[in-house]
Amino acid sequence: MKKTLIAALLALSLSACQDFNPNPMHSFDYNTGVTTYQTFWGASCTMGRDKVEHCTHPAAEARAAAKAAQDLIDARGKMPHTYDFPVSDDLAWASSNELPAYQKDGGRWMAGPFASQADADKAKATVAEHDAQVKADQEEQARQEAESKKEQEAADTAADEARERAEKQAAARQAAMAARQAQENDPRYRAKYVADLDKKYGNIIRFDSTESMRAIGSFDIDCPMTDHRVLPLYNLILATAASDEKMAVGANTHMWYEVQSAGGETRVVRGLRGQDRGEVFLIINKWGELNSTHAEAIRNACVSGTYGPIWK
């Protein structure tokens, strides 16, 4: 018993001698009252005003850390890789889901190590669920892209068709306008147009004398056009009467026009049937000047519009 105790004390003394420091260092902080020093055996110690000593041994701490690191290396080396399986390169996802993974030689990622088949199967189920979700997301994205492409193609087709219709309509309008202008440039067409108006609406206009008939029939309005066209006043009264009668019929009534000559003036009066008094529409004064409250309508009648081609 005594031999065993002596041997142990001797071994402890030899171990302590390995850390013996022949030049211990002391320092004192006057502000905190803490003394820092090293023992002959290599320990770092501090002592405050409470006279309580706190010591640490760097060599012992280093040996403990080294042993822990070696134990971890040994433990990892002993872990089996029997249950490991390959995974995709989505290591970030694996890490975020706390799935153990490592890279083999050649760059392939493996899930593991696992201590049992049950752990590996659980990890496989997690990976399979993730892969299925990724596949579903990819298919949904592809479906949305295909649907968006189809919608865009339909919109492009509709836009092309609308543009073609607009171009055809514009061409049709231009063709109709050109045809109408060609007709209106033909004196025979204009004469027939006025004759048709006179046949249908001439009976609306009454003259109170041959003088009034002569005054209207001989009066031409100069149009501000480069082709020097003129607008016969009778044609204007006839076209106006036709336009008014159409509106009156729509209101279940009729119009009347009367040309009156007196005192050197000629007046054109119009009104609704059943009314004794109408409004003065036109006046030719004794100096041969035409006055009207509808001067703008008269100027517009010099070109094809509401009244049609009634000029000469």
Image (tube, rainbow, N blue to C red):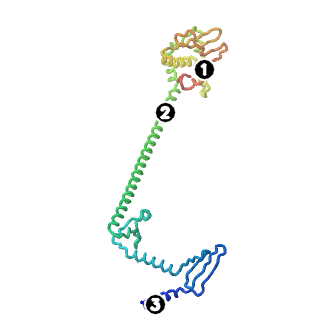
Name the one closer to the observer, 129 or 143: 129
Q: Amino acid at mark 1?
A: His
Residue at disc 1, secondary structure: loop
Q: Where does label 1 land, which residue? A: 294
Q: Where does label 2 land, which residue? A: 173
Q: Residue at x 35, y 63 (%)?
A: 122
Residue at disc 3, secondary structure: helix
Residue 289 in picture, x, y percent from top left = 65, 17
Q: Amino acid at mark 2?
A: Arg
Q: Are marks 1 and 3 in contact (CB under 8 Å)?
A: no
Measured in 3D between alpha carbons, the distance from the residue under mark 1 to the one under mark 3, in whole angstroms, is 142 Å
Q: Where does label 3 land, which residue? A: 6
Measured in 3D between alpha carbons, the distance from the residue under mark 2 to the one under mark 3, in whole angstroms, is 126 Å
Residue 141 in picture, x, y percent from top left = 41, 53
Q: Quadrant of residue 114?
A: bottom left
- Establish if 154 lies above or below 173: below
